[in-house]
Image (spheres, grey):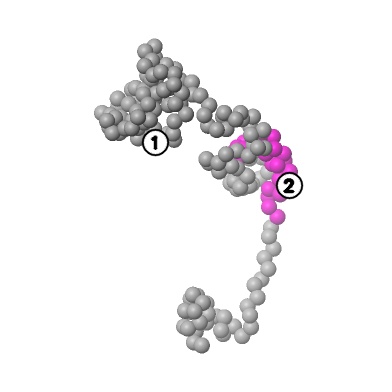
Amino acid sequence: MSVLGIADQLHMSRSTVRNFVYAGAFPERASTLRAKSLLAPYIPYLEQRWEQGCRKSNQLWKELQAQGFVGGYKVVNRWLEPRREKPGCKHSQREKRLLGLTAEEEAGTHSVQLEREPQDSATPSEESAAVTDLQAPRHLVWLLLRDPSGLDERQQRTLRFLRQVQRGEELYGLAQR
C-alpha cells in the first residue's frame, strides 16, 4: 500500500506514516523519568488540612510556604482542584459534616434576611415563595431589566420581593430607565 493510502486509512499525516515506513524498526519511545513533585513532602499536611475543612488554595499555599515550600500557588491549586465539589453539585455527606450544613441550607432554601422598609406589601406566603424562588444573580438582573408587563406571576412575585429593600428599588429604577 502507498504512503498516501496508509495515511488516509489511519487518519494520520503523510510525513508521520513516511517516518514509520522508512524507520526500518519500530521506534521505541524513550522512557522519561518523572521528577518528584515539589508538593510530595507536603501532601500529608494538605490532606490533613482538607479533612479539617480548609478549601482555600491561597491559604494552604501560604501555610506551606511557612513550612518551606518553594513551589507556586498554582501547584497547590492543581492539587485541590479535583477534590473540590463542582459548582451546583450537592455536598457529599462528609462535606456536610465538615461544613456543618443543615438540611435546609443544603437544599438552598435557607431564608434570606433583608433590611426592609416599613411599608411591606407582600404577604408572608408570597414572601416565603419568593425567597425559595430566588435564582442565580444573572437571572435576577434580567428580572430588573425586563418590562414588568411581560413577567409571569412567579417572576412578578420575585421582583416585588427584590424591590422591598431600598437598594433593590433604586436598582430597579435605574435598570428600567
Q: Which residue is mark 2?
A: 41
Question: What whole-number distance in Å separates the C-alpha atoms at marks 2 and 1?
Answer: 45 Å
In depth, the one of 173 and 14 nearer the eye is 173
Q: Are marks 2 and 1 in contact (CB under 8 Å)?
A: no
Corner quadrant of residue 135: top left
Q: Amino acid at mark 2?
A: Pro
Pick out the residue farthest to the bottom: 1
Q: The disc labelled 1 sits on which kind of residue?
A: His
**In which quadrant is the C terminus drawn?**
top left
Q: What segment is highlighted magenta in the picture?
A: 36-59
Q: Position of residue 95 (x, y in %)?
A: 64, 37
Can residue 122 be seen in this snapshot? yes
Query: What is the x, y in percent for residue 117?
Result: 39, 14
In the displayed structure image, the side of residue 60 where residue 113 appears, left or right: left
Precedes in sequence: disc 2 or disc 1:
2
Q: Residue at x 57, y 32 (%)?
A: 106
Closer-to-camera residue (168/57): 168
Question: What is the x, y in percent for residue 163?
Answer: 36, 23
Percent x, y for residue 144? 33, 30
Which secondary structure class fits the magenta region best? helix
State the residue at coordinates (69%, 34%).
52
Q: Can residue 168 be seen by looking at this rendering?
A: no
Does 173 sit above or below residue 30?
above
Please tell me in which quadrant of the rendered image residue 137 appears. Answer: top left
**Front-most of 147 and 28?**
147
Task: Tell me the residue that label 1 is attached to.
Answer: 139
Q: Is residue 46 magenta?
A: yes
Few, some or many C-alpha atoms within 10 Å of disc 2 (few <14, some 14-19, many ≥20)? Answer: few
Question: The residue tagged with tag 2: helix, strand or loop?
Answer: helix
